[in-house]
Amino acid sequence: MTRVLVTGATGFTARYVIPLLEARGDTVLRLSTRNCDVRNAADLREAVASARPQQVLHLAGTPNLDDSQADLAQAVNVQGTINLLAACEALPEPPRRIIVASSCYVYGDTGHAPAHERAPLRPRGAYGRSKLDMEQAAARWAERLPIVIVRPFNYTGVGHDERFLVPKLVRAFRSDTPDVSFVYRGVVRDFSDVRWVAAVYAALLGAGKVTGVLNVCSGKSMSLEQLIEMLAEMTGRRPRRPIAAPASDQVSRLVGSPARLAAAGIPFSPYSLTDTLRWMVDAR
């Protein structure tokens, strides 16, 4: 029985990971803003010392905020991670695995070839920069703590906040005349199902030989126009407004290579995007 500390324990991803960990017999120690703010170094150190985790899954972080909230992104994503790693290092027996969730947005625009983990990192916006800063901060502990950094690409599922693109689209298609004017033309993304991402994180906690950085992605490109067409066919409803012209600062393509994840023995997702969308459309 393994003691696993999960930060961001009330978040979207954690609600799928925690049941998997508990089902295999792990004891899950939950940290969230309800009981400890990662920005408070003293409180976090006390909480980690009390938990004595053998594994850590660090999911606490801000969503993809706009640049007006850059300070918040830095405080939570960067300083919060520094506080956590310092608390883990201070334990009499440090955890044997620490997974830190970064983001595909550290790449910026990945271009036409799927990005591998050694691709140039050119984030756009405060969120992507905060995640890159977080990775660079975590690297300071790489020789002293068993850290794995995951870079998840876009993923979604039932329970995803409707501020985000796919659940916002699903909500739109529950209307007789969906409004998709908030979608930018020509944008391409790499989509996965949260249930698979949760399974990946659970598997990586127990994968002893995995180190460094790992993309968590499908490697498949999907334009938002294609996504809208899938929802239209699924629901029988046609959009009443066209999608928007691309914004000048829009990241047009974010697609990753899952080769390193596959080499680590992690199976590809059993869920197609159609499966995920149908699950979300049918949910009430």
Image (tube, rainbow, N blue to C red):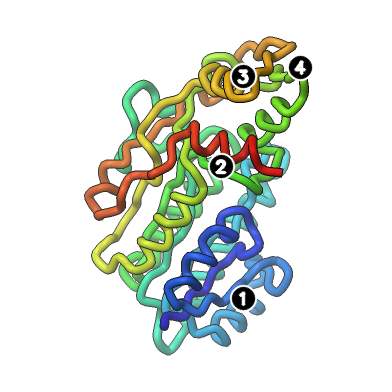
Residue 65 image offset from top left, x and y in percent? 66, 41
Q: Is residue 106 above or below residue 143?
A: above
The residue sitting at 69% across, 19% down in the picture is 180
The residues bearing labels 2 and 1 have C-alpha atoms spaced at a distance of 29 Å
Mark 2 or mark 3, earlier in chain: 2
Mark closest to the chain's N terminus, 2 or 1: 1
Gap in angstroms between the C-alphas marked 2 and 3 = 18 Å
Task: Check disc 4: other Cα within 10 Å, few if <14, some if 14-19, many if 20+.
Answer: few
Asked if residue 268 lies left or right of residue 105, the reply is left
Q: CA distance from mark 1 to mark 3?
A: 46 Å
Structural distance between the alpha carbons of marks 1 and 4: 48 Å
Q: Secondary structure at mark 3?
A: helix
Q: How far across and down, in percent of the image, does residue 28 sit?
A: 53, 75
Q: Which residue is mark 2?
A: 156
Name the residue carrying label 3: 232
Q: Which mark is residue 44?
A: 1
**Is there any visible trace of residue 120 in the rendered image?**
no
Q: Quadrant of the N terminus?
A: bottom left
Amino acid on which the number 1 mark rests in the picture: Leu
- Give the mark count: 4
The residue lying toward the viewer, choosing from 243 and 88, is 243
